[in-house]
Amino acid sequence: MKINRTIHWLFKPILIILLFLFSNNVFSNELNKLVNRLPSLNNDTGKVNTLNKIASFYIDSNFINAFQYAQKANKLAQEIDYENGYIESLRLLADANDYLGRYSEAQKLNFQLLDYYTHINDEELINAMNINIGIINYYQSNYNQSIEYTFKALAYYQKINDNLGISICYNNLANVYSDQLNYQMALKHYFKALEIDEKAENIGGICLIKGNIGEVYIELEDYEKAEEYLNSALLLTKITKDKWQEANILTGLGNLKIKQKEENKALLYLTEAFEVNESLGAVAEQSEVFESIFKLYEQQKNYKKALHYLKLFNTYNDSIYNKQTTDKIAEMNAIYDIKEKEKELEAKEAITTSQKKQNVALFASILLLLVIIGLSIKSNLSKKKTNAQLAQQKILIETKNRDITDSIQYAKQIQSAILPSNELLNSAFPDHFVFYQPKDIVAGDFYWLEQENNKILFAAADCTGHGVPGAMVSVVCHNALNRAVKEFKLTQPSKILDKVTDLVIDTFEKNNANIKDGMDIALCSLHQNNDKLNLEYAGANNSIYLIRENNLEEIKSDKQPVGKFINKQPFTNHELPIQKNDILYLFTDGFSDQFGGPKGKKLKYKAFKELLISVHHLPMSKQMNIIKEYFYNWKGDLEQIDDVCIIGIKI
């Protein structure tokens, strides 16, 4: 089986680089840590990310496990409305289905992803999907469509001078030309791809292409060159540790040895390929192994074993080849029966078998034609009715959408009303800024301020989800904060968060709905004590930063949310003296989690800290403008993935 190069190369760092950096034991330990952490995680974005990360670990070693964890991530991401985690799970499910030979499922997901990336106008990811769609069409022998999608991607990569992308397209086009028996055109494109990857020292790409070239030389009966390229590719798999490539190359060597009449060596290669595919769960590749073993035993005239492996091949093979496989099984049954009978019956039995095959083929063709005609008639009859229904539904949907949008806009006014006013903020902190950018019309993030007993209490909070669900949770959490201070007279941040946790859990458990929503928050209290300013802080998954004399100090939070949590502990209260010109930053995770930049990667906290250090000496209003501009430049044309809330306060 000639190997295609997929989006797997583009979405994550190439496996080879990782393997040079880490040993298998480190991978195994990291994977075990992630799996062991799962039971303690809440059903939130962190759990989705962990499930996706586990799936990405398995995508190169156990396709079934990769599929199962990605499926769990997909389900949870939909439940909590976590778009970024949902898209990542779709990508992993597409890869896993592809490797498992579930091509129709993989293609469905590929088109879903293509629609999404087209919607956000991400050309790189659009063309990555074009590659994957072209590959699935190749597997199903839809060669014109495969070439069409691959050429779309090739034009893009040539435009931006992306040599890796160009090499992938050349390899995949070569596979199509090879299947069309245009071997010279196939070799031309393989060697173009090989030249690019050798210049880039891309070991994984070199390995893959050499294996494909070896298979073409088998078809051209140039067995010496075939063995040279296949053995070279097999050696490279020892470096890349890519088991999937290794299994395909072993199958190629097995096929070569069958052609060279070296059946014992062929069986060794094919048995090893079978074992690797079995460990991976590579169904499509396993069917290739069974077909090769069938050919080996057929060549040896061991028809009983040949028939056994042909039946296995039939069981594993894609449904598109069912008729072709059935014919082969009928032929092998005839051959095996004839061996056991008298010689004079051989000719008669062979003729009978041939007639049966022809009758079955004719009946199947007629039946298929009748089904197609019936479906066409039914489709035409219902077309007018369907169009009328769709037009009516369109009007209804537009009306409902308008009503929903109006309601959400009004909800925004209500949510804005519970946020601290500019007058209140300026009164408490004359030198401050607030960068507040909801992802949707309403938000799950909010900022809060109260003054009680000569203490200024202030917070930046991130409630579960965003949009309407996040906004509803934020109202519950905002009310709980107010009650903890006004009703229960609490001013110590840790005690406030303990009480808010109880109030939030109590609110969500009133109807036994088992809702696990809550919030991450950084809560501070600033008060004067004997001419000294003191800061108290408690955090639920949200740290704060203090910059003093050009040094940034992170005061870390407790690793638990406000809300239901398995190993819930009382929150820690931090106390520290504050000096004049100190700058405090409170924030949620929306800024650092945003994808963007030239490579579409997550910004992360390291870059966020560096940005704050670089601007902290500026006036607070100027700081906000720079931070805001930095965020939008980083995001570019990508979609904002979460609400953003950053508070800066100069003492």
Image (cartoon, rainbow, N blue to C red):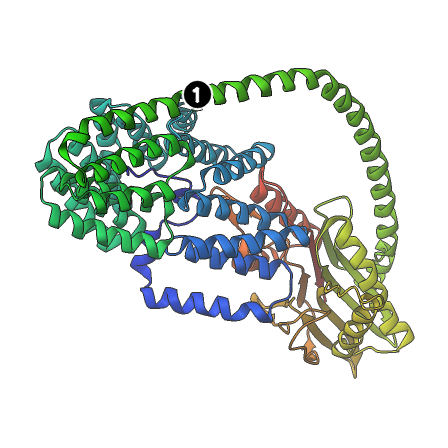
Res 610 seen here: no
Q: In terms of depth relative to the viewer, which is nearer, 593 or 232?
A: 232
State which quadrant residue 645 falls in: bottom right
Residue type pointed to by label 1? Ser
Q: Position of residue 305 (x, y in %)?
A: 22, 47
Res 168 seen here: yes
Q: On the picture, is 334 further left or further right than 563? A: left
The residue that appears at 55% across and 57% down in the rendered structure is 49
Instruction: Count residues near mark 1 (Cα–Cα under 10 Å), then give few for <14, some for 14-19, many for 20+.
Output: few
The residue that appears at 80% across and 64% down in the rendered structure is 477
Identify the secondary structure beneath mark 1.
helix
Quadrant where the C terminus lies? Answer: bottom right
The residue that appears at 29% across and 54% down in the rendered structure is 276
Q: Position of residue 546 (x, y in %)?
A: 63, 68
Q: Position of residue 125 (x, y in %)?
A: 49, 37
Which residue position is annotated with label 1?
Answer: 365
